[in-house]
Structure formats: C-alpha cells, structure tokens
Amino acid sequence: MILSRTLLALVAATSLAVPGMAAAANPAPKTSTRTCFRANDVENFSAPDDRTVYVRANRKDVYRLDLFSPCPDVDWAWEIALESRGSSWICSALDATVITKTPIGPQKCQVKKLTKLSVEELAALPKRSRP
C-alpha cells in the first residue's frame, strides 16, 4: 500500500481471494501469541534509518519492521508501499515486503522481524520516529 507521511494515498495489497471479496474471504487468522493487521489498515509510517520502518495500523497499533538489509531511500521517502503475501493479513515478517521508490526504480526490501510495540515502547520512541 502506498503510504504518505500526511495522507494515505493508495492501497496495493495482494490477495488470494476474489477481488472485492477479500475481507469476507480472508477472516482474521486465529492466533494466540501473534497479532495481525491488514496491509490496507496501515495509516502512516516513519523510517528513522534505512533498516527500520514503523507503521501505524488501526489507528492505535504500531508495528516495527526490521529489514534484512539497508533499504535504499526508505528513510527519506515520503511514501512507501507495503505488500502482503499469501493474504491481506500480515502476521509475521514473512508476510510483508516494503517497497520504496529509488532513482533506478522500485526497490523491494524484505522484512526480517515484525514486532507490535507496547504503549510503553511507543512512548519511548523519539517523536520524529513515531508514525
């Protein structure tokens, strides 16, 4: 999904469900220890460096995406895309890819670790790092 620091512009999430029926065909996965969010529920992002992206989903939840390697221009980007794999739900690092625009075209960046931040962890983030 294309995210803007000030405005959510476009959602581009892949899904195995029939178009237009994705929400009905993809109910939230039942997990006991993991927290999931849908790629199209992401409202904002911040990237304090080229290996870390924070996304805000469902207005109150913030997730930290640690990337496998430096992602070109993600820390300078005004917008990024978040692509989900397998369904519209992102429940683990394997479910998500961050896409940035670079001078030579789009760059896909694999997510190594996905962590939902607690209220305390979010409060501890520097203001410029909060999505």
Image (spheres, rainbow, N blue to C red):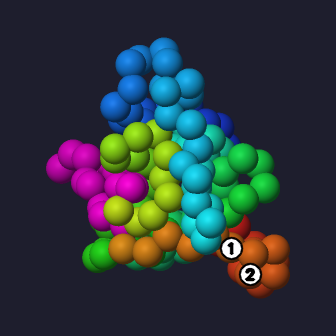
Answer yes or no: do the residues labelled 2 and 1 have beta carbons within 8 Å?
Answer: yes
The quadrant in which residue 67 appears is: bottom left
For the residues labelled 2 and 1, the Cα–Cα distance comes to: 6 Å
Q: Is residue 98 magenta?
A: yes
Q: Is residue 105 magenta?
A: yes
User: Which is more toward the observer, 21 or 5?
Assistant: 21
Determine whether, in the image, residue 97 is placed left or right of residue 125: left
Residue 78's disc is: none
**Range of magenta residues:** 95-111
In the picture, which quadrant includes the C terminus? bottom right
Mark 2: which secondary structure?
A: helix
Give the vertical position of 104 relative to 111 (above or below). Answer: above
Residue labelled with disc 1:
117
Determine whether, in the image, residue 16 is placed left or right of residue 128: left
Amino acid type at image mark 2: Glu
Residue 78: % across, % down: 51, 50
Give the vertical position of 38 relative to 32 (above or below). Answer: above
Amino acid type at image mark 1: Leu
Residue 96: % across, % down: 39, 55
Residue 121's disc is: 2
Residue at 48% across / 53% down in the picture? 90
Mark 1: which secondary structure?
A: loop
User: Which is more toward the observer, 69 or 104?
Assistant: 69
The quadrant in which residue 64 appears is: bottom right
Determine whether, in the image, residue 94 is placed left or right of residue 118: left
The answer to whether residue 81 is visible is no
Residue at 66% across / 51% down in the picture? 57
Q: How many marks?
A: 2
User: Which is more toward the observer, 36 or 14?
Assistant: 36
Residue furthest out toward the left: 104
User: Mark 1 packing: few (<14 Cα in 10 Å), some, or many (20+)?
Assistant: some
